[in-house]
């Protein structure tokens, strides 16, 4: 993880983990989620959905930190992220 | 949406038509008024702006007539009885959103105090030349209800009637007065608040409006829509939608149409008029009757929907039908169409600016039975 | 290539409770910024924990105008340019309902321009979210009053030759109490701005610069909506409280975003109540707050 400056409690930091849910049929292949995932978790799949779009697929799912940026940026409500570990999740945070 | 009896200015008053109309709206429980000043309707707005603050109503002078029409639709959806008033040029501006009111099925009242037209015309003189525009001013197929008072007293009563009709049939209702009635001062007797002679009867009609803020989370649109309110863009849905807007009125014409007939049975000629013209024709008819001509009269309190059935009936029985109006033949066209050549049809019309001279009407009556 | 065949068990996207799911998928193009913008609105409504039964959305005509049809709230799809006066009537009739006007730049500022400036002048307690894609998208890409000079549109095929509006300046000079501009990319800051706009007493205006791929981007050969988002990423400058004379948007140049105006100012109903109280004293019952006859 790259930091601008190293926090003093970096040893105690608990990085959250997220679990991605992709509603492939709703996706229109816009690529917002792929472009703006801070950890490069997603890529557009080689396969396509029934409308001919390439939905995203998680190529590095272990890197997802549940930041929800994909969920918020998606114009088609086709991807969302839930907290994978025991932490509290804010809805649409 | 209920009327509050304490709003009613019970008693005997000396009011002009516009003021009486405002009082009628207040008595009916109108609580929102959005308008734009235009002669000769401004007195309605002025009176409402004076009376509303202590009655819990809100008056807002909007930036133009388009905003006014939309604001009253929004207020109706917010649960308040609402109205606006205007004259010819403003009426033209309101047309698109009058259509929105029809499509959204929103109850509200629109008063057009007609003046000489077209365009800026005669701002301070009467006309009745917006009648066809009242019927067809907005685009698309639809039906309207238009009332025409002939006096300040009637301006008061028809304002209440208009609100009731608008809620029963869920649509904007028009009150087509004119500058003459609007600026004429006469005795107006306002009954006590409990007397509600125009209470709507609950007997069929469109489903009630859904109120905002009660969890219905509904959607309404000016696009062609289905019963859910969602837009459906195809010919079939459109047919259903438009048919509903038309049938709402067409199937209830017997309930809506209000004619005041006198001496029509056995008449040779029947004179039809609305608004101030229906008063102006009285001396002419009286004179003709004195000379032995069998003249009947029909005052149209509702001008739209037009009494097609009655006119078709009469045309088969009388020698002539005469229409008196302050325009060059607008409602006359309807009368002529329904007469279908079965009798003579005569128009007593002019461009507006003044009421008819009774002699002119009398002459026309005499000519018609020759 | 084989299509992905199997759909996993029923997904429930967190936003579904605010959407009319029977009308999803929506009609907006791939890479259109509107879906993103309504996510910001939904997030704002959720975070404010507003009573979902007492919010009304009013929109006009255009791509953005379709938002009313997709949000599961009391929603009104009115005529072109008239969403603001409709919202005025609705708000005055029912002051406790949160009325949000959500429409496009052509709808609100061109045909609706007069209503916009007057309602801002009155400081009517409304939230107006204007999605600015610099074009009339729904009807085929005509030039809009926000189209930057030299940009192409279907009715300015040789490039727009008019100065565009500076919307934050227009709103602020008309009297708005809250003015902010963000792009669809600044999704979290946009959500915060919408939250502030909704809670603000008075006329709150949020301009959202959103990508339009099928019309604006295509007619100007700017790529897709994703390319526009990348452009916003590289060219937007956050300057809260910037001098509004400097926030004009020129064609493919920097976009100044941020919160520009946030002032306390009595609303329309405040002024009305105050004025009438002055004249009538205790006889006057202040309007607004409770429902019913007053």
Image: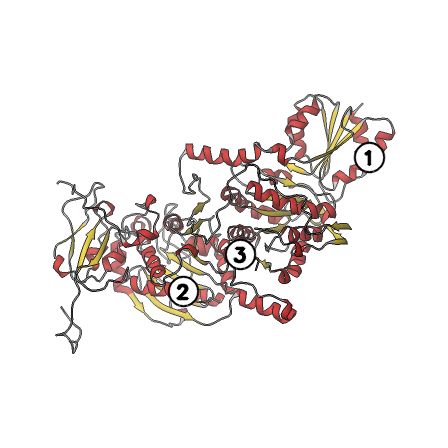
On residue B184, the disc is: none
Instruction: Kindly report which numbered mark, 1 or 2, lies closer to the viewer in this rendering.
Output: 2
Residue B147 picture location, percent across and down? 66, 41
Give the image quarter of residue B198. Answer: top right
Q: Which callout, 3 or 2, points to the residue nearer the camera?
A: 3
Q: Quadrant of the N terminus of chain C?
A: top left
Q: A21 or C285, which is in the foreground?
A: C285
Question: Spatial distance from mark 3 to mark 2, Cα to Cα?
Answer: 21 Å
Q: Would residue C43 appear left or right of B7 to someone viewing this image?
A: left
Give the quadrant of residue C140.
top left
Residue occupying the far front of the picture: B194
Label pair 3/2, CB-CB below 8 angstroms = no
Q: Is residue B305 visible?
A: no
Q: Which residue is mark 1?
A: B284
Instruction: State the image coordinates of residue B213 (x, y, percent, origin top left).
Output: 46, 54
Q: Which residue is mark 3?
A: C93
Q: Does mark 2 fall on the same chain as mark 3? A: yes
């Amino acid at each position: 993880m790259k930091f601008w400056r190293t926090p003093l409690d970096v040893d105690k930091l608990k990085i959250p983990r997220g679990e991605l849910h992709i509603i492939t049929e709703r996706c229109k292949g816009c690529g917002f989620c792929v472009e703006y995932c801070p950890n490069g978790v997603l890529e557009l799949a080689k396969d396509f959905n029934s409308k001919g779009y390439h939905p995203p697929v998680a190529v590095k799912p272990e890197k997802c930190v549940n930041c929800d940026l994909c969920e918020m940026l998606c114009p088609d409500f086709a991807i969302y992220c839930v907290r994978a570990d025991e932490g509290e999740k804010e809805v649409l945070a | 949406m209920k009327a509050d009896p304490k709003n009613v200015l019970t008693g005997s008053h000396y009011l002009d038509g516009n003021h009486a109309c405002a009082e009628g709206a207040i008595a009916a429980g109108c609580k929102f008024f959005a308008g734009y000043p235009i002669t000769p309707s401004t007195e309605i707005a002025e009176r409402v702006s004076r009376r509303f603050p202590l009655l819990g109503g809100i008056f807002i002078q909007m930036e133009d007539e388009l905003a006014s029409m939309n604001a009253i639709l929004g207020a109706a959806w917010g649960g308040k009885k609402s109205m606006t008033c205007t004259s010819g040029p403003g009426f033209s501006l309101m047309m698109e959103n009058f259509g929105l009111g029809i499509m959204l099925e929103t109850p509200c009242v629109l008063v057009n105090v007609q003046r000489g037209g077209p365009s800026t015309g005669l701002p301070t003189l009467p006309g009745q030349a917006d009648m066809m525009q009242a019927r067809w001013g907005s685009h698309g197929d639809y039906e309207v209800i238009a009332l025409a008072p002939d006096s300040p007293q009637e301006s008061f009563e028809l304002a209440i009637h208009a609100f009731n009709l608008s809620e029963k049939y869920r649509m904007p209702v028009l009150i087509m007065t004119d500058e003459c009635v609007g600026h004429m001062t006469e005795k107006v007797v306002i009954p006590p608040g409990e007397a509600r002679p125009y209470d709507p009867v609950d007997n069929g009609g469109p489903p009630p409006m859904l109120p905002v803020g009660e969890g219905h989370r509904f959607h309404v649109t000016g696009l062609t829509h289905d019963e859910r309110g969602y837009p459906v863009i195809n010919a079939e849905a459109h047919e259903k939608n438009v048919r509903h807007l038309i049938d709402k009125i067409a199937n209830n014409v017997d309930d809506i149409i209000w004619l005041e007939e006198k001496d029509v049975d056995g008449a040779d000629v029947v004179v039809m008029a609305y608004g101030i013209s229906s008063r102006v024709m009285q001396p002419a008819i009286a004179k003709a009757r004195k000379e032995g001509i069998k003249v009947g009269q029909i005052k149209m309190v509702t001008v739209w929907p037009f009494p097609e059935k009655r006119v078709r009936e009469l045309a088969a029985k009388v020698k002539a039908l005469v229409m008196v109006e302050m325009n060059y033949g607008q409602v006359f066209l309807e009368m002529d169409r329904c007469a279908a050549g079965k009798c003579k049809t005569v128009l007593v019309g002019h461009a507006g600016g003044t009421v008819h001279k009774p002699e002119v009407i009398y002459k026309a009556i005499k000519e018609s039975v020759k | 290539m084989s299509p992905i065949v199997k759909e996993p068990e029923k997904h429930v996207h967190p936003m579904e409770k605010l959407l009319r799911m029977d009308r999803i998928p929506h009609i907006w193009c791939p890479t259109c910024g509107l879906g993103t913008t309504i996510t910001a609105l939904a997030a704002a409504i959720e975070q404010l924990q507003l009573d979902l039964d007492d919010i009304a959305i009013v929109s006009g005509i255009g791509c953005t105008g379709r938002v009313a049809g997709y949000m599961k709230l009391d929603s009104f799809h009115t005529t072109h340019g008239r969403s603001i006066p409709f919202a005025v009537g609705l708000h005055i009739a029912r002051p406790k309902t949160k009325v949000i006007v959500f429409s496009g730049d052509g709808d609100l500022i061109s045909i609706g321009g007069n209503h916009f400036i007057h309602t801002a002048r009155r400081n009517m307690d409304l939230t107006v979210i204007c999605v600015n894609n610099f074009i009339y998208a729904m009807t085929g890409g005509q030039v809009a009053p926000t189209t930057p000079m030299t940009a192409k549109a279907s009715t300015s095929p040789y490039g727009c030759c008019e100065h565009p509006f500076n919307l934050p300046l227009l709103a602020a000079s008309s009297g708005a109490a809250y003015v902010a501009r963000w792009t669809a990319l600044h999704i979290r800051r946009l959500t915060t701005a919408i939250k502030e706009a909704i809670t603000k007493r008075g006329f709150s205006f949020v301009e959202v610069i959103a990508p339009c791929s099928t019309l604006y981007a295509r007619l100007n050969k700017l790529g897709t909506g994703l390319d526009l988002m990348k452009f916003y990423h590289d060219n937007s400058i956050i300057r809260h409280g910037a001098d509004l004379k400097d926030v004009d948007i020129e064609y493919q140049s920097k976009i100044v975003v941020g919160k520009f105006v946030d002032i306390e100012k009595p609303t329309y109903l405040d002024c009305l109540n105050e004025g009438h109280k002055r004249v009538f004293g205790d006889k006057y019952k202040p309007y607004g707050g409770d429902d019913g006859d007053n």
